[in-house]
Image (tube, helix red, strand yellow):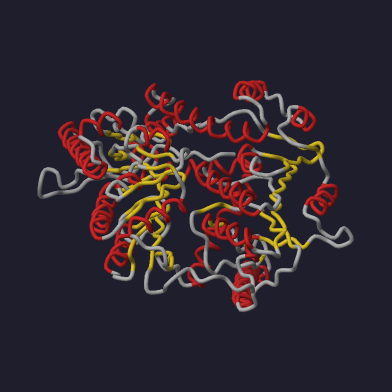
């Protein structure tokens, strides 16, 4: 029996209905995306328009520092203050901006003091130390008060707070004071389940070069554990010293407090003298008015860092425009080419060459904040640094990390500055080649076959394992590159190759330990390096120029929004576990990075 004829047309009707619904949905999504795009452009235009309207600073203002954004070496000159849904401008704060603002505020009669409005900081140890030192300088030279307050202090934000005259905590708040840790995520089991063999080849005597261990081992090697513990002890000693200076508590007392987590609640933190008092925000505001002699009947005129950097006050010229001191920023991983997300050998080399060939540039400061990356790219940059140092004074200022490839590009400098808490050294190299034959065959059912003209034409493929002969060849390349690395350091630091090898072998050091071993010349921050470069060049009247020139605004906006989108998605769906995404990204990098690498094995962030 057949169904009525009109029902034969029902499937076609349903198809057309769903097709038009899908088309309508796609059209609506397109319209929404267009609206979002033009909305972002409008926000951008509004932000750009506001650039022409400098901030008016009132008498009796208080500079409010909230450093919960990511702290980088160099902030964006065209940083924006727009807020469009989850995508917000001003997502990063530059160390250079913080230092400039504090310098300006010292002599600014309209600024009565500083309010450190702290909860968390996203930075490495050396950056925090530079900011803390600048806050101490601000207090000493201006005589103006600095007050710190937080609902919750992390160990990083508390470290900064110790620069304040008074440290306050929200009642029922918490001070997280329990020591430092560094934790790896080992991926050996993951790769075994995926049938991926990570072929890790390090220098024959590079026992401390542990980057590849996270892919090939289940726990830390004894050598790596030893160097990590030494690093952590050095970093903790600096942190403890700052707390001791503020509280008057001895090192032993502070270690006991940390070891027993004795300051885990608000009253304990106050009773142990880690904070001066417990205050609600309204009580804090009253205290600020009293401490800074402000009108008690009026609201406090707080000014943020971003707005303060764009005031309408006339600023002193930095010096004779004909004489320049170039500050070149090298931040991120090292790779060949332009380095869109870090240091590119082509782009950074061009910037250094430009400064070297500019007769008006009398000295160069190279700010290095990098865990390394490609060995060959590091060699390319090393050459330009060497040539520049032969032409004019070139001083390296090391940030949180200047290790492995980051140290490679630093070693030819006229002089090297590092903070005691900088992580540096890691003089060593390794090779990392994934063998994914088992993954493709056993997990995906994919096999490979082909033809070649010569024996080693397919040597670097990921579709098969290295042969024993190829492993020996790879080991020789790694060992030869390490020998070259040692020679570069020995030449630049005026050491013997034996001396460099004894402190090399992939081992990382704090800046303080590196100075004792001749890898660093002086302890200090970016401003110390700038002063040293000017002295070496015998210039006192100069204009500081920051290089490379920053990207076109809209191009950078779109790239930053892309980055912000990824970060927002991670925070929205992973919460506190968003840090696991970083480890996953490292696993992805392992499959993409092949050949000889000069990279530090881990990143240390103070929380």
Residue at the far left: name it. 454
Q: Position of residue 204 (x, y in %)?
A: 23, 29
Q: Please determine whether, in this image, residue 102 is positioned above or below residue 156.
A: below
Q: Please determine whether, in this image, residue 247 is positioned above or below residue 142.
A: above
Q: Please determine whether, in this image, residue 223 is positioned above or below residue 451.
A: above
Q: Where is residue 134 in the image (x, y as percent from the top left)?
A: 57, 50
Position of 54 with respect to 504 (left or right) is right
Which residue is painted at 69% across and 39% down in the image?
Answer: 153
Q: Which of 65 and 443 is in front in this view?
A: 65
**How many marks overall?**
0
Q: Is residue 465 visible?
A: yes
Which residue is painted at 46% across and 38% down in the image?
Answer: 420
Q: Nearer the viewer, residue 196 or 157?
A: 157
Q: Can residue 9 be seen in this view?
A: no
Residue at the far right: name it. 297
Which residue is painted at 66% across and 42% down in the image?
Answer: 161
Q: Quadrant of the C terminus?
A: top right
Position of 464 with respect to 193 (left or right) is left
Q: Where is residue 50 in the image (x, y as percent from the top left)?
A: 64, 76
Q: Quadrant of the N terminus?
A: bottom right
Q: Where is residue 276 in the image (x, y as percent from the top left)?
A: 76, 37
Position of 105 with respect to 471 (left or right) is right
Position of 120 with respect to 520 (left or right) is right
Q: Which of 207 and 460 is in front in this view?
A: 207
């Amino acid at each position: 029996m057949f169904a009525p004829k009109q029902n034969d047309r029902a499937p076609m009707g349903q198809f057309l209905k769903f097709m038009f619904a899908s088309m309508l949905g796609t059209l609506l999504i397109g319209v929404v995306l267009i609206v979002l795009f033009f909305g972002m452009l409008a926000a951008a235009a509004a932000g750009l328009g506001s650039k022409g309207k400098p901030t008016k600073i009132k008498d009796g203002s208080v500079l409010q520092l909230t450093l919960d954004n990511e702290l980088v070496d160099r902030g964006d000159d065209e940083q924006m203050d727009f807020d469009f849904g989850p995508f917000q401008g001003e997502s990063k704060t530059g160390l250079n901006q913080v230092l400039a603002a504090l310098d300006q505020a010292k002599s600014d009669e309209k600024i009565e003091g500083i309010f450190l409005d702290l909860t968390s900081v996203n930075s490495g140890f050396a950056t925090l130390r530079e900011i803390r030192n600048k806050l101490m300088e601000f207090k000493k030279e201006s005589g103006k008060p600095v007050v710190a307050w937080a609902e919750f202090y992390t160990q990083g934000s508390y470290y900064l707070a110790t620069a304040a005259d008074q440290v306050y905590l929200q009642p029922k708040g918490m001070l997280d004071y329990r020591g430092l840790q560094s934790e790896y995520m080992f991926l050996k089991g993951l790769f075994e389940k995926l049938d991926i063999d990570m072929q890790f080849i390090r220098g024959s005597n590079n026992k401390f070069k542990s980057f590849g261990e996270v892919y090939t081992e289940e726990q830390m090697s004894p050598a790596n554990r030893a160097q990590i513990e030494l690093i952590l002890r050095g970093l903790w000693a600096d942190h403890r010293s700052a707390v001791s200076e503020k509280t008057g508590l001895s090192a032993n007392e502070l270690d006991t407090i940390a070891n027993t987590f004795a300051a885990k609640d608000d009253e304990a933190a106050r009773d142990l003298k880690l904070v001066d008092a417990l205050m609600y925000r309204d009580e804090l505001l009253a205290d600020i008015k009293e401490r800074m002699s402000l009108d008690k009947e009026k609201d406090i005129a707080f000014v943020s860092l971003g707005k303060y950097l764009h005031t309408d006050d006339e600023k002193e010229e930095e010096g004779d425009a004909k004489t320049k001191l170039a500050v070149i920023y090298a931040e991120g991983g090292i790779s060949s080419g332009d380095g869109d997300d870090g240091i590119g050998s082509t782009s950074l080399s061009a910037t250094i060459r430009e400064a070297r060939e500019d007769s008006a540039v009398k000295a160069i400061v190279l700010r290095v904040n990098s865990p390394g990356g490609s060995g060959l790219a590091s060699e390319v940059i090393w050459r330009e640094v060497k040539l520049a140092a032969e032409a004019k004074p070139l001083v390296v200022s090391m940030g949180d990390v200047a290790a492995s490839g980051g140290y490679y590009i630093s070693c030819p400098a006229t002089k090297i500055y590092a903070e005691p808490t900088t992580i540096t050294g890691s003089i060593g190299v390794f090779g990392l080649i994934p063998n994914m034959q088992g993954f493709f065959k056993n997990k995906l059912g994919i096999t490979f076959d082909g033809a070649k003209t010569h024996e080693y034409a397919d040597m670097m493929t990921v579709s098969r394992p290295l042969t024993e002969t190829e492993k020996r060849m790879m080991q020789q390349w790694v060992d030869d590159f390490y020998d070259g690395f040692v020679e570069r350091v020995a030449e630049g630091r005026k050491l013997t190759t034996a001396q460099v090898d004894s402190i090399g072998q992939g081992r990382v050091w704090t800046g303080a330990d590196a100075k004792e071993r001749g890898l660093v010349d002086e302890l200090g921050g970016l401003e110390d390096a700038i002063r040293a470069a000017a002295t070496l060049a015998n210039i006192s009247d100069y204009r500081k120029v920051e290089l490379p020139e920053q990207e076109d605004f809209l191009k950078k906006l779109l790239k930053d929004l892309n980055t912000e989108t990824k970060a927002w998605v991670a925070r929205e769906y992973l919460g506190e576990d968003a840090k696991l995404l970083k480890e996953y990204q490292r696993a992805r990098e392992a499959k993409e990075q092949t050949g000889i690498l000069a990279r530090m094995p881990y990143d240390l962030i103070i929380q």
